[in-house]
Amino acid sequence: MLLALDDAISSAVLAGRGSDAEILGVVDLTTKTEARFSTLSLGRAIQFVANASVLGYDVRGAMVLYGLPGRPSLRKWDCDRIWARYGGALLQS
């Protein structure tokens, strides 16, 4: 059942990869402050959260918000898993 749910979420994310997303909960380790991001596509937001730790960000508390209010957010481990599975396909429009 859990695998089917993960596949449904992944499919929905892939289909909506161009929709607007917001990233919250990312800390810039240089300034020790929460990083601010402009609205970007869902695919780019997932890419950033999945790879941000090598760029000097703490993403343990990161959330990617997308879609209608009330839709579940994506956490760091969601972004890692989705990026590993779909990679560059998330960046195509």
Image (cartoon, helix red, strand yellow):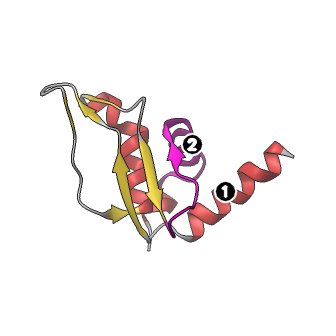
SS at mark 2? helix
Q: Residues within 10 Å of mark 2 (few under 14, many from 20)?
A: some
Residue 60 as seen in the image, left or right of residue 32: right
Picture quadrant where residue 65 is located: bottom left
Magenta residue check for 38: no
Residue at point 14%, 25% (across, down) = 30
Q: Residue furthest left?
A: 31
Instruction: Kindly identify the amino acid type of the residue bearing the numbered disc 2.
Output: Asp
Q: Earlier in the sequence, mark 2 or mark 1?
A: 1
Tell me the quadrant of the picture where the C terminus can be found.
Answer: bottom left
- Residue 13: which quarter of the image? bottom right
Q: Nearer the viewer, residue 6 or 24?
A: 24
- Give the residue number, with chain letter if any, for mark 1: 9
Magenta span: 67-87
| Mark 1 residue element | helix
In the picture as drawn, the residue positioned furthest to the bottom comes out as 93
Amino acid identity at mark 1:
Ile
Picture coordinates of residue 74, whole percent (x, y)? 53, 48
Asked whether, in this view, residue 26 is left or right of residue 64, the answer is left
> On residue 74, which mark appears?
none
Q: Residues within 10 Å of mark 1 (few under 14, many from 20)?
A: some
- Asked if 18 appears above or below 54 in the picture, the reply is below
Q: Which residue is mark 2?
A: 78
